[in-house]
Image (tube, rainbow, N blue to C red):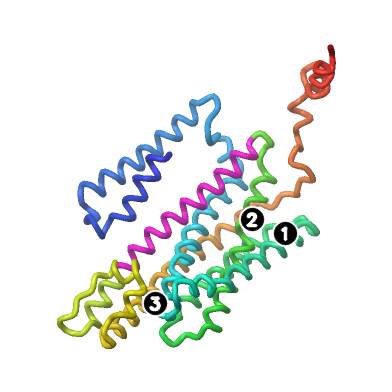
Amino acid sequence: MAGAATSLLLVTVWGGSQYPWTSPVIVVLGLAGVALLVGFFVQEGRADEPIIPLRLWKNRVFSVSTGLEFLVGFSMFGAIIFLPLWLQTVGGASAQNSGLLILPLMAGLMIASIGSGRLITKTGRYKRFPVTGTALIAISLSLLSTMGVGTSFLESSSYMIILGLGIGMIIQVMVLAVQNSVEHRDLGTATATESFIRSMGGAFGVAVFGAILTNQLTRNLERSLPQGSSIDPGSLTGSPAAIAQLPQAVHDAVIQSLANALHVVFLAAVPLTIAAFVVTWFLPERPLRETAHVGMAETLVEASGEPLLERTVEEVAEP
């Protein structure tokens, strides 16, 4: 699994930048990633105690949730990573202030997480939250794509609040849905797999959107920079503070090029979020358990009908 993830991530990071997409390095890495992934699942089907039991994929809640988490992680983290870049370059904020300016997103996330949790506890229904959350993320990404040089802090903050509300309605709710649907013996494995797939989606999202940003920025700079000027796009995204040291004419061209490139990045995440919105409608809604140990009584009873737990306690108490 580690080898497959590394190979496929390198394809997205190196493809089209350090190596052409059709180069032997990219082709070999892609084939190796697919082969290692297939080999992992083949071995999991043979193992007595697999890391990820294949029976989990027979659970519809789990299978739908993992697909949803990958799509949400892909679009969500891909967008969040580039918000500080927009704030430091197009918005003109310092590195320290750019972190503080993302607080509206965190506020929306906390409000939605706490509010959805309390409502689920009262009603026992959770499907409406990922449906609403993916819709809000799609709306917020569409709004973020409209930001430009003249966008005010109030506008960007309102867009980030919507994004945070959408995220807060999905992440913890999907973990709850998975934990509520799997057997007790698979509780830890299912939770960890869910988080891993969301993280992998985020890693792929950052790599893919980073490639989109670099390609768009390169094209924009070629069209907008004054004649005779040449700038490495990697130096701009890697050190936003260096932009302030550029001559005024070059500085204005760079800022406008970055704004247009980030517009494409945020807009590219919208179709993925729409796909996640469609996936949420296939999520089954099952009654919430009152305890994580539902079903343990059956697994702890021998053929004789004697509870193993009670017998074990008696044996331990014997001198």
Q: Is residue 277 left or right of residue 269?
A: right
In depth, the one of 296 and 13 nearer the eye is 13
- Write the residue at 15% across / 81% down: 228
Helix, strand or loop status at disc 3: helix
Dot 1 or dot 3: first in sequence order is 3
Q: CA distance from mark 1 to mark 2?
A: 8 Å
- Does residue 139 show up? no
Q: Main secondary structure of the magenta part?
A: helix
Please name the residue that numbered disc 2 is placed on: 172
How far across and down, in percent of the image, does residue 69 sit?
A: 54, 54
Write the start and end of the magenta stretch as one range. Answer: 186-214
- Write the residue at 64% across / 55% down: 172
Residues at badges 1 and 2 in contact (C-beta under 8 Å)? yes
- Write the residue at 36% across / 73% down: 240
Disc number at residue 89? 3
How far across and down, in percent of the image, does residue 29 sit?
A: 29, 45
How far across and down, in percent of the image, does residue 127 sit?
A: 67, 58
Helix, strand or loop status at disc 1: helix
In depth, the one of 117 and 46 nearer the eye is 117
Q: CA distance from mark 1 to mark 3?
A: 37 Å
Q: Callout 3: 10 Å neighbours few (<14), some, many (20+)?
A: many
Disc number at residue 117? 1
- Residue at the far top: name it: 319
Residue type of the residue flagged with mark 2: Gln
